[in-house]
Amino acid sequence: MGWLWAIIVGFVLGLIAKAVIPGKQHVPLWLTTILGMIGAIAGNAIARGFGVAETPGIDWSRHIFQLVAAIILVFLGDMAYMQLRGGRRRA
């Protein structure tokens, strides 16, 4: 059940990240989900480093860290994907 939640959270974070980033992203949905999952893991690690990994009630600060990490990763992943895809297209 843990993997299912990781996929769902990664999917949602990836879609929110794509909506926040201005312009069109060309990264496919499967890669967006993976980058969202990695963003969630990185956000949890950053929140743990700041000492806000678990708080009573809803962990808003942890969710903010996860979203910011997902936005950064989707942005960088889109740039890398376009570099690789663009190079293949010209050949």
Image (cartoon, rainbow, N blue to C red):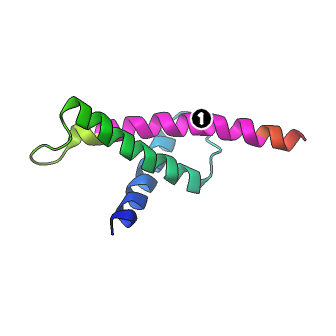
- Residue 84 image offset from top left, x and y in percent: 74, 40
**Disc 1: CA contacts within 10 A as few (<14), some (14-19) or many (>=20):** few
Magenta stretch contains residue 17: no
Quadrant for the N terminus, please.
bottom left
- The residue lying furthest to the left in this view is 56
Instruction: Judge whether 55 appears above or below 4 on screen.
Output: above
Q: In the rendered image, which residue does mark 1 sit on? A: 23
Q: Quadrant of residue 51?
A: top left
- Residue 82 image offset from top left, x and y in percent: 70, 38
All told, the count of numbered labels is 1
Q: Quadrant of residue 88?
A: top right
- The residue lying furthest to the bottom in this view is 1
Q: For this view, does 9 lie left or right of residue 84?
A: left
- Residue 11 image offset from top left, x and y in percent: 45, 55
Instruction: Indicate the secondary structure of the residue bearing disc 1.
Output: loop
- The residue lying furthest to the top in this view is 50
* Amino acid type indicated by mark 1: Gly
Magenta stretch contains residue 74: yes
Residue found 78% across the figure and 38% down from its top: 86
Q: For this view, does 21 lie left or right of residue 81?
A: left
Q: For this view, does 13 lie left or right of residue 90?
A: left
Instruction: Judge whether 11 appears above or below 73 on screen.
Output: below
- Residue 38 image offset from top left, x and y in percent: 44, 46
Which secondary structure type mostly characterizes the magenta part of the structure?
Answer: helix
Quadrant for the C terminus, please.
top right
Residue found 41% across the figure and 36% down from its top: 69
Which region is colored magenta? 64-85
Residue found 58% across the figure and 39% down from its top: 77
Residue found 39% across the figure and 64% down from its top: 3
